[in-house]
Image (cartoon, grey):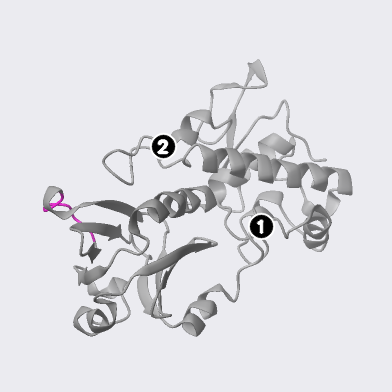
Amino acid sequence: MPELPELENYKIQLTGYILNVAIEKMVVHRPKVTNIEADHVNLMLAGNRIAFIERRGKYLNLHLHSGHRLLISIVLGSSLYYGIREQNADRKSDVELQFEDGTALYYTAGRQGLMYFCSAKETQAYFADLGPEATDRKLTREQFITLFKGRRGALKTALINQSLIAGIGSYYADEIAFTAGLLPSAKVQDLDEEALSKLYNAMHSVLEEAIETGGHMEGQPLTANDSLTGGFHALRRVYEREGEPSVRSATDKVVKTDVAGKKTYYCPASQFEQ
């Protein structure tokens, strides 16, 4: 499942390729992925350009010079690829955003993804239920502690709650809990300020490292020359490492369990309730 670092990686790389390049048209291969007929939207897209790319939660928000937005949801099964059209004639995707320079952005939506053409106001409606961004510098340690102090239930459940903190999913929730030395099943209401402070530090260190190393989606490069995407997967500490030695102790192994219906990985020798 793509999460904040994967989308941030997409945003950073695409910013270097598609900003201020004239759009030729949108080609829709799977109509249910979009909210408007391609012929109609192309009247507004043709010649338009992307001014900048914003990431919000698990969305990429492409701001057009016209003031409109192209909103892309990156969920389970979703992926993006950018390349020269003549070299990707057989590439399968749900939507192609074609540019006048002969390149295209290929979007595969998965089961629940979308690529919508929206007004600025319509776009904000998709973000209405999202909490603050996990990596937003405006989210201070004190604010983070206050958010979590009002919660109950398992730590992992809180970390992946998009209305509480936006951008974290199952993969990074486990990595963050490990780095903080807390069990994913620990009760949030039992965590003191010191534990929550460790969690805040862990959240930033894990997500920043993951962004710098291209996230965890290995084998899905964004471009033909992309050697960054997926680099974090080799650096993960616990996720999908069941039965392997813990990075903190060669004699202890990573365990797989279930927390609120989500597969969860942790090191029992170094993660605790508090």
Residue 26, image x and y in percent?
23, 71
Q: Could you say whether the residue bearing mark 2 is in a helix, strand or loop?
A: loop
In this picture, which residue range is highlighted in magenta? 88-93
Residue at 69% x, 29% y: name it. Answer: 268
Residue ID for mark 2? 228
Numbered circle sitting on residue 136 = 1
Any part of residue 196 in sight:
yes
Query: Residue at point 66% right, 30% down?
Result: 267
**Closer to the camera, 203 or 208?**
208
Asked whether 103 or 57 is in front, the reply is 103
In which quadrant of the rendered view does residue 202 lie?
A: top right
Give the quarter of the figure containing the C terminus. top right
The part of the image, by quadrant, that contains residue 61 is: bottom left
**Residue at 73%, 33% in the rendered image:** 271
Q: Secondary structure at mark 1?
A: loop
Q: Spatial distance from mark 2 to mark 1, Cα to Cα?
A: 23 Å
Q: Which residue appears at 23% of the width and 74% of the height?
A: 31
- Binning the other alpha carbons within 10 Å of mark 2 as few (below 14), some (14 to 19) or many (20 upward) gives some
Q: Are marks 2 and 1 in contact (CB under 8 Å)?
A: no
SS majority, magenta? loop
Mark found first going from the N terminus, 2 or 1? 1
Tell me the crowding category of disc 1: few under 14, some 14 to 19, or many 20 or more residues within 10 angstroms, Cα based.
few
Q: Which mark is residue 223?
A: none
Task: Reply above or below: 137 against 178.
Answer: below
Q: Amino acid at mark 1?
A: Asp
**Kind of residue indicated by mark 2:** Leu
Q: Is residue 25 above or below residue 253?
A: below
Query: In the figure, is residue 221 to the left or right of 198?
Result: left
Q: x%, y% of residue 5?
A: 52, 48
Q: Please determine whether, in this image, residue 269 is positioned above or below residue 230.
A: above
